[in-house]
Each structure stands twice: as structure tokens, then as C-alpha cells.
Image: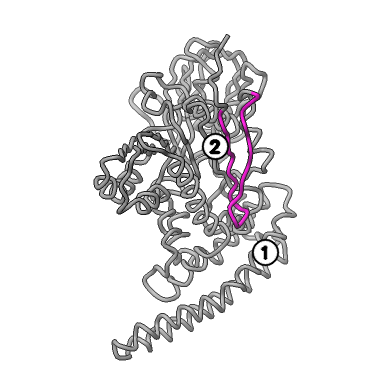
Amino acid sequence: MRLERNKRYLVETEDNTKIVRFYDFQGAEQTCQVMNYSRTGLAFVMEDGSLVLRIGDVINDLRFYSLNKEIYRGSVSIVHIQDEEDEGKALSSIGCSFNDTQLDINTIAKGDKITKLQNDFMDFIRSMALEDNLDPEFVNLTSHLHYLFTGFQEKLTQDEEQIRQEEPEIRKLLIETLRELAFDALFDEIIRYYDRFTRITSRFTHSKQNFIHREFFQKRLMHFYMKSKLFNRAYTKPLGYAGDFEMMNIIYRNEYEGDDVFSQVMNKLECEEAAAKAVRNRRTYLYEKLGEVVASLTKGDTVKIFSVACGPAMEFFDILLSLQGKELSFNVDFIGMDQDELALEDARSRIEPLAKEKKNISVSFIKDNIKRLIVGKEAEKEIYADADLIYTAGLFDYLSDRAAKRLIHKLYNFLKPNALLIVGNFGLYNPQRFIMEYGGEWFLIHRSEEELKGLAEGLPEDTTIGVEKEPEGVNLFLNIKKPSYQHVNP
């Protein structure tokens, strides 16, 4: 932590040792991370906080904890709320002032240092006996996988060095053959490993078990997985979150990418597993839905399509390719919205050159976020209204149920009568889930069909709601069809 001139102590983002707890107006207990504090008040971060709290509200029993010790309990008044978007979540900075007493800052600082020293030393002691706390089958399986990767890396490195000495005309063919041989030998074996890891971790009943086993797995094997371009990006999160547009592009390319043969094979292995296949199938699924809309158009029609958190927007690129060389008697307005300017630039570079060749096709890319969609000014959202098709895939995997429900209701209001909203979400079946979480620290919110349907709760009763799957059965798609007539509010 560091000290500002105004004596406000800032808590580092990764420091989760300082939290507040309180009950909201619905009686639900909230636990929120503290951002900063002073003698007279503090600020904490809360998902969708501006939907729960307002400036001037009083929280009668707020408890402030530092390193599991309660250091304040009493009444506070909300004096500041600021919203921002982070990894698809609407986060609010809530500032409040203490109503009952002031904090003893010196005592807190001393207590923090002592407690931190104690905790660090105990962590060291526990780490020395880490394997005693691990599932023996998990340890044994990790060791076997380490042996397998080590052997393949050594063999591929040796063979690649020898191939580099060959004449250029045979060198490329030999490298391609080596890659394919290694992939074929490893793929089915790796899948069997992941199935066994999944069976072991499914027995864990506490988050701490997952934590220590994931730590052990990464210490033994991460130097292998970091060779994969896909998992390297998932783990390092250069844009601050996993599942960014470039990760999607890597999955779409599905190639032997990397600086050496072993790296190329590691990348290809992860791009050929079930979840990655499901992402490619998702692109095909959305392309077909777009195609159905376009095929239904007649002369003079105009269709408006809105992609939320559009990423690289490859499905619309595919539609544009399918329309090349054809005279269009109808008009297509496409809006791609994303919070990431780099994702929008990537989509623009691919889509706008094709769209410019068609005077009947209008393309707009807008930098916006989910928070503004839900609670922003209505005038700012007019561009999204009266859509014939709205779809989003890869966003709801990161949204809480509360945020997801509010967003679905908002998007539903943007639909024309008889229009369709499609919401993609990973289902409970995901054979790649173990390695995504343990190898890439890539965590998704997996939902069942019923849980996905439950996100549409509260929509008009005559709304048509169903769930579809892509061929792998990993990605689910909530389809919400608005009635052909407009509801009139009483």
C-alpha cells in the first residue's frame, strides 16, 4: 500500500485482505473489496453498485476487515459513486464516510505488518509440506504428464535441429511431417489425461483444494503450457482478461503457431479440443442465423443486426463473403459494439473493406460497455433500437446472474416485434474446462439449459424461449423471440 498527501491509504488491486461486509436493502449480505481508506471514510468496489446504492444512503452496520480482523463496525453514509466497465462486468466505486467514529490508522498499520509476517511465514511452512495436502493420484498424474511433455520436447527439439540441416526443398515437408506425427501421438493421450484430472478434481469440495492443486500443477507444468500461443495469452491476459479478440482469432486460425515445433504442437493441441471446437462451431451457428435473416429479405427490405461484445465479428465477415458478387435488392445495417477498441479495430480491418463494395450494406462499430447499455441515458442508446436480430456470444460466460438478467431485459427492449435475441453461454458439459482453469486461469460461468432459460425470467409470457446447441454440445444458445405485436404498458 502507498500513502497519498491527503492521508488516504490506497489498497493495491491484487490485495484482497481488506474487505467490507454489509446487508443491502434486500437483506442480502454483500462482501466487497476495499479500494482505499482514511481516518474518516473508505471506498470499496461493488458489481452493479449503482443499482443497489445511491448517494446519501446510510448503511447502518458496515464492518471493515483487515487481514480477517474487524477494525471498524458502525454506520456510514454514501458520498460518492463512480461506475466503470471491467471484463464485461459493471463495477462501481462506492465512497462512504464514517458516521460513528474515526479509524486509528497507526494501529491498523502495525497490526497489518505483524499479521502479514505471520501469514507469510505460515504460508512458507505449508508450502514445504504442500504434497502432503495433495491428492496422491493427482500428484502421480501430474508427474506422468511432466515426463510425457519432457520426452516429446527433447525429441522434437533434436529432430528439428537435424531437419534444419537439410536442403530447403525437403526441409518444409519434414517439419510438417514431424508436427503431424507429434500431434497425432499426443492428442488422444492428452484428452485421456484431462478426463482423469477432471474426475479427480470433481471430488474436491472446497475451493482451497482447487487452489493448492492448481498451484502444484502450474509449478510443474506451466513452462510447457506457456509454449502454446493460446494458453500463453489466456494466462498472461495482456488486455487484462482472458477470452479477448486475439484469443478468438487464434482459435479460429487453428494452426501450428509458435517459434519451434514443440510450441506449435502445444498450440494446435489446445485449439483442437472440445471448447475451442465449440468456439468455431459458434461462429458457424451465428453465421447460419444471420443467413436465415438475410434469406428472408425481399426487395426494399431493411434489416438491422446488433452484435453485443462483437469481438472479431467473424460471423458477419462470413456473411459479407457469401454476398460477394451478388446484387442486393435489400439493405443490411450492422452494428458491432465492444468495450475494447483493439477488438473493434481488428473487426473494422476485416469487415469494412468488404462492406464498402456494397452500397446496400451499412456497418458501424461502436465502443460502448454493458453498464451504459443497462443504466445509461436512453438518448445514447437510440442507435441500438428497433433491431431485427441481436446476438452476443462469449459475454454472458463472465456475467453474474443479476447482470445477465438485466442485460437480457434491456436487449429485449431493443428488439422489433417478431425479432430474435440470441445469447451464447458455455453449458455444464465442457471437457476442456480443467485445463482452461488449471493451465490458463481462464474461468467461465457455465450454465445449464434451465439456468440459461432462467435468465429470461420476467419477460412477457408470450415470448418464445428455447435453447439450442452447437455440434460439440459445449456452447448453448438461448433464443428469445419477441411476439409479433408490441406490448402496451398499462
Mark 1 vs 2: CB contact within 8 A: no
Q: Is residue 352 left or right of residue 442?
A: left
Measured as percent of width and height from the top left, residue 237 is found at 43, 50
Q: Quadrant of residue 115?
A: top right
Nearer-N-terminus badge (1/2): 1
Q: Nearer the viewer, residue 348 or 87?
A: 348
Task: Name the residue tied to disc 2.
Answer: 399
Q: Residues within 10 Å of mark 1 (few under 14, many from 20)?
A: few
Find residue 69 and report its horizontal and vertical position in percent: 62, 31
The relative height of residue 90 versus residue 475 in the rendered view (above or below) is above
Instruction: Identify the secondary structure beneath mark 2.
Output: loop
Instruction: Based on the picture, tell me whether residue 443 belongs to the magenta stretch.
Output: no
Q: Is residue 378 above or below residue 179?
A: above
Dot 2 amino acid type? Leu
The alpha-carbon separation of the residues under discs 1 and 2 comes to 27 Å
Q: What residue span does the magenta drawing correspond to?
A: 461-482
Extreme-front residue of the structure: 299
The quadrant of the image that shows the C terminus is: top right
Q: Amino acid at mark 1?
A: Asp
Which residue in the protein does label 1 denote? 195
